[in-house]
Each structure stands twice: as C-alpha cells, then as structure tokens.
Amino acid sequence: MTSKKVYLPQIKVPATYMRGGTSKGVFFNLTDLPDSAQTAGSARDALLLRVIGSPDPYGKQTDGMGGATSSTSKTVIVAKSEMADHDVDYLFGQVAIDKPFVDWSGNCGNLSAAVGSFAIASGLVDASRIPENGIAVVRIWQKNIGKTIIAHVPITNGEVQETGDFELDGVTFPAAEVQVEFMDPADGEGAMFPTGNLVDDLVVPTDVVAGGVLNATMINAGIPTVFINAKDLGYTGAELQEAINGDEKALAMFESIRAHGAVKMGLIKHIDEAAGRQHTPKVAIVAEPVDYISSSGKPISADEIDLNVRALSMGKLHHAMMGTAAVAIGTAAAIPGTLVSLAAGDVERESVHFGHPSGTLRVGAQASKLDGEWKVNKAVMSRSARVLMEGWVRVPADSL
C-alpha cells in the first residue's frame, strides 16, 4: 500500500497591485512577508517568482500576477527607512518571465512613482509629513542603486489623490500627476561615463554590424544605458514594437550589443555573464526627430519633439519608455557631445522632449562640469500611479 502524498495549502501574503507610470507590479510591506522572505536570498526570490508566475515556458505567466511583459513582471518591497532623512526604503525586483531569476541590479523609474503613494497608504510615512490637503514630499531610499528619490504625492482630505486629468502617453486613462525627482542619478560606485568618454567605439561581432564597430554613448544615470545611433543599425528611430520584437535576428543583435556594452562599462567581466544580468544595462537607439504615428494611432510631429528614442527592456522593445531610461536620456541630452545630445541638435538644454513608441515624454536634467567630470544634481519627470487591487496574494506554501 502506497502512502498518499500530502500537499501543503496555500499561504496568504498581504499585497497591493499597483500601476506606476507605464509599468505595474506587486507591492509588499517588508514586514508582511513570510519570515524567510524578509531577508534577501533564495526564499525571497522563490516567493516572488511564484507570485508573478515564473518561470513560465509558455511565456504567459498565467499562473501568477505577471502580465507576460517586462513592464508587468515586477515586484516592489517597501519598508520604513534605515537611512537618515528618508521616509522609506524601496527595493525593486525585475522578475524574468521564462527563467527562475529575479534581477536586483537596477531600479524601475516608473514604479518609483507609486512607492510614495504605497508608503503613505501603508502607514510607513510619519503622519506629521502628510498635509490634510496639498503635496506630501516622500523621501525614498532606492536600495538597489543606493540613491535618493523624491516623490511629490498629491493629498486630498488626508488621503492619497489618485484620480485626475494628467495624461501620460502609454497609459490609457488620466490620473493624478506625481512629480518624481531622481537625485544625483549617476552611478554611486563610479563615474557617470565609466569609460571616461562621451562617445566610444564599441567593438561588436561583425555579424552585428559590418566592420564590427559602433559609436556608443555609455552612461550610468538612472540606469546603466548604451545609446546607439539608429541609422547605424538600419533604423529610423521611429519604429514601433512589432518592427523589432517580431524580428528574432534584430533581438539577437540588440542583446549582443547589450552584452558587449556591459563588458565595456565594467558591469560584467565576460559577455557570457549578460544572461544573468538581464535588467541592466539597457540598450537604446536615438535619432533626429521625424514624424510618425504612435502605437495608439496618435500622430507625432517632428516639430514637437527634440529627438526619437527607442529602448529595449528584458530583451524586447519597450512599449513606451522605462522611467530610469528616461533619466538616462535626460541626463545625456544635457551633456553636449553625447549621441543623445547630438540627435537633439547638440544645444545646451535643461529638459528634453523625446518621442517613444506610445507618444512623447519630457524629462528635465541640469548638468555641470566640475574638475573635468560631468555631474547632474537631479533629473525630474512627471508620472502617475494608482492602486489596482489590494488584499492578499496566495502562493503554495512549499514554493518558499
């Protein structure tokens, strides 16, 4: 007689499903996580993978909260801050869709806009810092990259104001505007330009580009990003998702560029390590402004933008623009001589308005040169955020 296998029941974990900017993810209060997941490690990763529904060989994340895109396969952990002069600590986990992997190497700029709202609603911000009506300034310590983010959250009658008339290209419905400041966005562990150059010759395989060399601006600001001229890869810079995501050869080309850029930036030692660091660096193409029709059917005129940018995230062309990549764009645009600045006319500027597949976005940044090194005090952009669902997520107890 064989014994029947005993299956453990599911456990309930308090969670909030939120949209921030053009992304959405599952938010947790650190102290609500199971004890084994309150510290970094395999138990935490296993929990988040199961919550999102990864790894999924079908690429759908049907058995989890993920939406089968890099923009919707995300998790956030928030806690009262251990840092002086900060309200909360914010940790971001980018969950791979088809692999058992959570990437902790970078931030999500879009979800940063939701952290302040979540922190206030969760009681993690001191009540004395929240006005009855007005703007609550939430000081966020971004633990992945060791940087400060300031979120300006609208408050009405003592509660977070989520509804409003602020429209963000890439998001269907309007909501309340949340201004987000990314303070000192350059990499805290190294120079803004890790190679010391505004433009480098990036050596890549000859099957990527004839001659095996591409001009590249590699910058650590917001998130490590490799910028390439669109025309050098045969693009106009006005492409929509299907033009690249439906082309396996193009995706392999971009991944090769990303891997070689990561080595050049000192993020990894060998291109083989890039598979274990999918979230960073990003790779983006830039081009002078041209007219195009966005993915929503909205006409974008070359006269209303300074340049076009298309960026890839987790191996696919993003449907709009990652918030952290927008910081990199704004920072690079403010520094004359970068490929981003050159595409935008190479003039001094404190903000840049760029086109992306879903429409346009403006981001501000002020750059200055001190002792031969470029420095940006902060980058600023407006986003919106709102709670989609709150309660508990359930996962099988044996998944931890």
Image (spheres, rainbow, N blue to C red):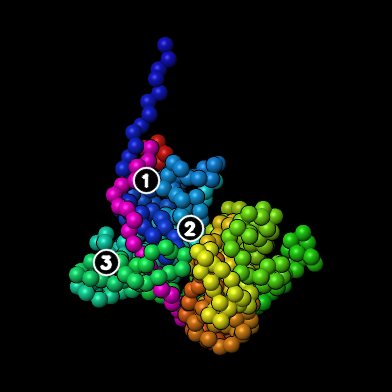
Give the numbered dot on residue 24: none
Q: Nearer the viewer, residue 293 or 133?
A: 293
Can residue 170 be seen from the camera position used here? Answer: yes
Q: Residues within 10 Å of mark 2 (few under 14, many from 20)?
A: many
Identify residue for label 1. 36
Q: Which residues are magenta?
A: 377-396
Q: Quadrant of the C terminus?
A: top left
Q: Residue at x 36, y 54 (%)?
A: 17
Identify residue for label 2. 71
Q: Secondary structure at mark 1?
A: helix
Can residue 263 be seen from the camera position used here? Answer: no
Question: Residue 139's image quarter?
Answer: bottom left
Q: Secondary structure at mark 2?
A: loop
Q: Amino acid at mark 3?
A: Val
Q: Amino acid at mark 2?
A: Ser
Identify residue for label 3. 160
